[in-house]
Image (tube, helix red, strand yellow):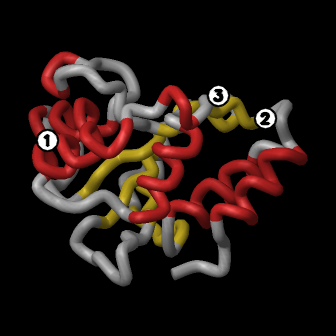
Amino acid sequence: MSQFTAQHVESLIALHLDVVRFGRGVNSVGEEWIERAEQRLGFQLPNSYKCFLNTYMGGEIGSEEIYSIYGVDFECANGGDVVYQHIMGLKNNLIGEKELVISETDFGEVFFFDCSRFNSGEYPVKLRLASGEHVNYASDFFEFLYKRIIAHT
């Protein structure tokens, strides 16, 4: 677990509304769709990510979409639906079964949960560089959000 909490992220968002464009929880898909996503994926989503989905629904940091759950059939959701992205990534041999992509940059960088390392309700976030090298990026989703916001300020 990281030192970052939902409150740290909320405070940073409030300071950088020019960079962060997130939705509102009133429009979130809710627990039913989160449970459907977990069933389709075959593993749990991390607690910090579920908090993000329920609080903000989804959105962008800079020009980078943070994948979410769109609330439509996963097989045809398209765009930044995290489950659709996982299905397509597996189909095209771009990811491993225990890698859940949560965002990509225009520079070919891919951020993903390492779902083989579940610890206290969280997965670490790794970064696949354009070179193909994998590096540790954040210990959980809150730290990931915090670092991405800072990177765009």
Amino acid type of disc 2? Val
- Of label 3 and label 1, which has the lower sequence position? 3
Rendered position, 117 above or below 141:
below
Q: Which of label 3 and label 2 is nearer to you?
A: 2
Identify which residue is drawn at 52% across, 49% down. 52
State how far apart marks 2 and 1 are (Cα).
31 Å
- Of label 3 and label 2, which has the lower sequence position? 2
Identify which residue is drawn at 36% across, 74% down. 121
Please name the residue that numbered disc 2 is placed on. 19
State how far apart marks 3 and 2 are (Cα).
9 Å
Identify which residue is drawn at 65% across, 69% down. 5
- The foreground one among 71 and 132 is 71
Rendered position, 86 above or below 148:
above
Rendered position, 80 above or below 141:
above
Q: Secondary structure at mark 1?
A: helix
Rendered position, 104 above or below 75:
below
Residue furthest right as drawn = 15
- Of label 2 and label 1, which has the lower sequence position? 2
Amino acid type of disc 3? Ser
Q: Residues within 10 Å of mark 2 (few under 14, many from 20)?
A: some
Count of numbered labels shown in the rendering: 3
- The foreground one among 92 and 42 is 42
Residue 63 tag number: 3
Please name the residue that numbered disc 1 is placed on. 90
State how far apart marks 3 and 1 are (Cα).
25 Å
Asked whether residue 149 appears in the rendered view, the answer is: yes
